[in-house]
Image (cartoon, grey):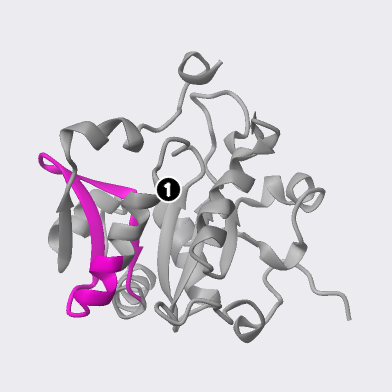
Amino acid sequence: MELQSGDITASVIIISMNKLYPDIMGVALCGGQSTRMGRDKGMLSDAGKTWAEKTLDQFKFFKLPYVLSINHLQLNEYRKIFDSTLLFPDEDIAVGPLRGILSIHKKFPENDLLVIACDLLNMKKDLIAELLSVYSQQPEYDFISYQSEDSFEPLISIYKSKALREILSSVLKGQIERFDLQTILHKGKTCSIAVKEEDKIHFKNFNYNKNFF
């Protein structure tokens, strides 16, 4: 039987080669509307690779299993490059990036998620390594995120499955009025990592044509 997007069982994908982080999987967030950029950011090319591919390379470096979070309109184009079993279109829950995160959580409810947006092209592996290190050393937290002044960096963060389960339940019951990740991280049990001044450039999102072209 040919597997379609979202049909693959979790056990097929989540066999992690990295025994240090057996419960975590990478999620490349590519499902945004890209209204400011004017085109699908995940399919933009840099040094011969799409931005989506470059994001997956980050997970591959740490030997983590991974999937791509996309919207339904992107499915046909992404199938031309990626195996269909890695593509998970958003479900009709919540809005914004939380929709993609919860959609992946529904498919892999036992896994913690390392989320990286596909437009974080300057993200250093050292910064990802620090996230993973804190994740393994601080198991009591629900979220691990970088923080610059009073703002978190939600699109390069770790979300624990238990917390996502509670968020999903609240969303389905209509108990959450605001779906923005900043609110969730501020109200939740979040371990914050201060962004150093010299590292701020690595958290830049490429949102406009003039940022990149």
Position of 38 with respect to 20 (left or right) is right
On whether residue 203 falls in the magenta region, the answer is no
Report x, y in % for residue 81.
Answer: 78, 49
Q: Secondary structure at mark 1?
A: helix
Image location (x, y in percent) of residue 31: 56, 47
Q: Is residue 40 above or below residue 143?
A: above
Residue drawn at (49%, 76%), measured in percent from left and top?
A: 18
Q: Quadrant of residue 41?
A: top right
Q: Is residue 50 visible?
A: yes
Q: Residue at x 69, y 46 (%)?
A: 74
Question: Is residue 183 toward the left or the right of residue 35 in the image?
Answer: left
Check disc 1 and give the amino acid type.
Answer: Gly
Residue at figure coordinates x 28%, y 75% from the top left:
136
How many numbered discs, if any? Answer: 1
Disc 1: CA contacts within 10 A as few (<14), some (14-19) or many (>=20): some
Quarter of the image where the C terminus is located: top right
2 versus 74 height, above or below:
below
Looking at this view, is 6 or 114 the one in front? Answer: 114
Residue depicted at 31% across the width and 71% down the height: 167
- The N terminus appears in which quarter of the rendering? bottom right
Residue nearer the viewer, 93 or 188: 188
Magenta stretch: includes residue 155: yes
- Furthest-right residue in this view: 1
Q: Relative to residue 156, is residue 108 drawn left or right?
A: right
In the image, residue 94 sits, relative to residue 37, either above or below, namely below
Span shown in magenta: 133-160
Q: Label 1, on which residue?
A: 96
